[in-house]
Image: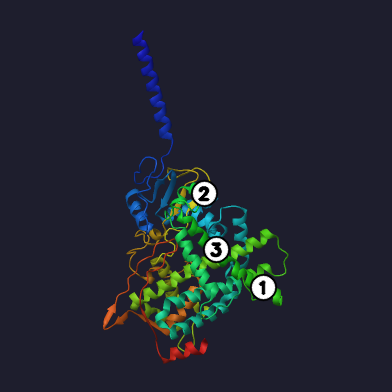
Amino acid sequence: MEYYLALLVFVILFIFKVVFRSTASKTPSPPPGPKGLPLVGNILDMPSEKEWLTFARWGETWGDICSVTVLGQPLIILNSATVACDMLDKKSAIYSDRPVLQMGGELVGWKNTMVLLPYGDRFRRYRRLFHSLIGSQSAVKRFYPSEEFEARRFLRRVLMKPDALSAQVRKTAGAVILRISHGYEVKESHDPFVEIADLATEQFSLATAPGAFLVDLIPALRHVPQWFPGASFRLQADKWAATLSEMVNGPYNFVKQQMVASGTAEVSFSSTLLEGKCLTAEEEFDIKWSAASLYSGAADTTVSVMNSFFLALALHPEVMRKAQSEIDAVVGSERLPTFEDRPHLPYINALLLEVFRWHTVVPTAVPHRVMQDDIHEGYFIPKGALVIPNIWKFAHDPRVYSNPFRFDPERFLPAKGLHLADASVFISCVMSLAVFDVAKCVENGVVIEPVHENTTGTISHPKPFKCSVKPRSEKAVSLILAES
């Protein structure tokens, strides 16, 4: 009897094992990645800075789609632009959501801006507002005169204070976007709106960096009282929230006050949406925060690109000379370049595209959140997983760009079919090339070699560097002073 019972148990166990294996074999595995620890997963593997470099190394080991788990939260890392397009673009219906970032989104308040807005009705309303006013080339053209004006002011500022190049770049970036978003003309020194935007966007970069705050991994910590040991992040969040509120409300109230005082305001994103309309509280909220999204999204990224542009010229004088030769041939020396010249300056456009590629402004973008379970390339992508596109790797992928660490604008020639760089970046850069020579600094007879390194954060800047910026000629000086 015992023999038959043992045989029966063996048969049942065998059948269970076969069924289990069969079921398991039908369930796709998640993407591969470094092995984690029980309970905490890969929390010790997560980088504290320049996370894109660690993610790229994982990609070399585990492939274009790899994954880790941090305290139960799956993270999917994408190291290929093709894979990212297939997932985030072609499957946008399930990959367009944004994660709930406890520090930057919930506690500080950036969840109301486009960059962290969850996919839904408000997200679609913001998209419609942007498209209606700045969604086409013809719509953007109305801002060309003000962009050219601010670019000429930039030239004069640099001429007067070449050693303060980075400060002039930041002032001009803020001036251009404030004109477009709120019709505001910045003051020449210590402008309150520019200064508060600089502070707020710097704080955004710190508050949203992957792994920077434990509360993003353990959401329950947001309820810890401020006096509790280790809860200094709560005090930090309150301070940053006050900065964000000031950045959002200050320029918006300026537009409203102008419209009340004179019945109109300079044409801008905000004034166009407010003019002659009786708005609900929700509509006004959407306008205020979408304008702030435009303002905050462009200001700091433009600063990063412009500083990268000057760094590239200092490091690669042969590129600068070739770009200047094209301007001299197309524009001449009797006037400054304008937007009308852009179609005839292919090398300048290629140069700017290479700047965008060479220095990745947003190295890991802002994570996406998967809205439902998915199978992609045979891998299981669970609902709620955070998908992080490693844009730095996309831009430095040797399968796409030969010798990716070499600065080479000619890789983008001919530029047919490529998206051209941002308009305000183009006009400031092409005017600068027309009138300035950029070179390495020489101090006490010693050449100071600039180094190209990225700062850590959601928005990455070149680390501070020195360069020499001098007028190309007396004629260039005359152009700067005559056209400012």
Q: Which mark is residue 257?
A: 1
Relative vertical location of residue 203 with respect to residue 227 in this rendering, above or below? below
Q: Earlier in the sequence, mark 3 or mark 1?
A: 3
2 or 1: tag closer to the N-terminus: 2
Choose between 310 and 106: the one closer to the eye.
106
Above or below, comparing residue 155 to residue 11 in the picture:
below
What is the number of the mark on residue 223? 2
Mark 3 or mark 2: whose residue is earlier in sequence: 2
Most extreme residue toward the left is: 445
Q: Which numbered dot is residue 242?
A: 3
Location of residue 382 in the rendering, given as x and y in whole percent from the top left corner? 47, 43
| Most distant residue in the front direction | 227
Name which residue type carries label 1: Gln
Q: CA distance from mark 2 to mark 1?
A: 38 Å
Which residue is painted at 34% across and 60% down in the image?
A: 398
Depth check: 53 or 38 in front? 38
Question: Disc 2, disc 1: CB below 8 Å?
Answer: no
Q: Quadrant of residue 389?
A: bottom left
